[in-house]
Amino acid sequence: MTTPRSMTQSAFFVLTALTDEPRHGYGILQEVEELSEGRVELRVGTLYGVLDRLTADGLIALDREEVQQGRLRRYYRLTDEGLAALDEEAERMAAGARAASRRIAARRAAPGAAPGLAGGTA
């Protein structure tokens, strides 16, 4: 398995969409849109590029293939490695959000704090 150096927002939401059950492409698209509250709208071509990369990295695997209405549906599932990578990325993002929140709170608590960067202008 090759762990990705950085996880894209699309990959993060695809992995998140697969945490509870295997899904096919269209199901993943719908779940990502719901999970991201509409902020991430994957196009089909982008989705399959992400799926190919996540499969190559060992983070997801083909679960099964089914023919429905004459079309092949591939279902993907999250691997243990994928769950670990998702957990690590979620913690990294949460730590970043906590750091930002501390800085925002400190800025708001400092009366008369100058806007912009220290020693410069915004």
Image (cartoon, grey):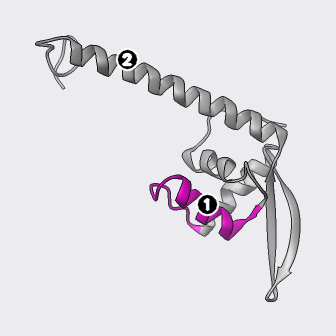
Q: Left or right? Give the position of 17 relative to 23.
A: left
**Label 2's element?**
helix
Most extreme residue toward the left is: 112
**Residue holding disc 1:** 31
Q: CA distance from mark 1 to mark 2?
A: 32 Å
In contact (CB < 8 Å): disc 1 and disc 2: no
Which image quarter: residue 1?
top right
Amino acid carrying label 2: it is Arg
Residue range corresponding to the magenta coloring: 23-43
Q: Left or right? Give the position of 53 relative to 118.
A: right
Q: Which residue is depicted at the point 54% across and 30% down?
A: 93
Q: Which residue is depicted at the point 68% across and 33% down?
A: 87
Q: Which residue is depicted at the point 81% across and 37% down?
A: 81
Amino acid carrying label 1: it is Glu
Image location (x, y in percent) of residue 16 = 65, 47
Q: Residues within 10 Å of mark 2 (few under 14, many from 20)?
A: few
Q: Does the segment drawn in magenta span residue 39?
A: yes
Image location (x, y in percent) of residue 96 = 48, 25
The quadrant of the rendering that contains the C terminus is top left
**Label 1's element?**
helix
Image location (x, y in percent) of residue 69 = 79, 88
Q: Is residue 27 above or below residue 94?
A: below
Q: Earlier in the sequence, mark 1 or mark 2?
A: 1
**Residue holding disc 2:** 102
Q: Is residue 81 above or below residue 73?
A: above
Q: Which residue is depicted at the point 80% across and 64% down?
A: 75
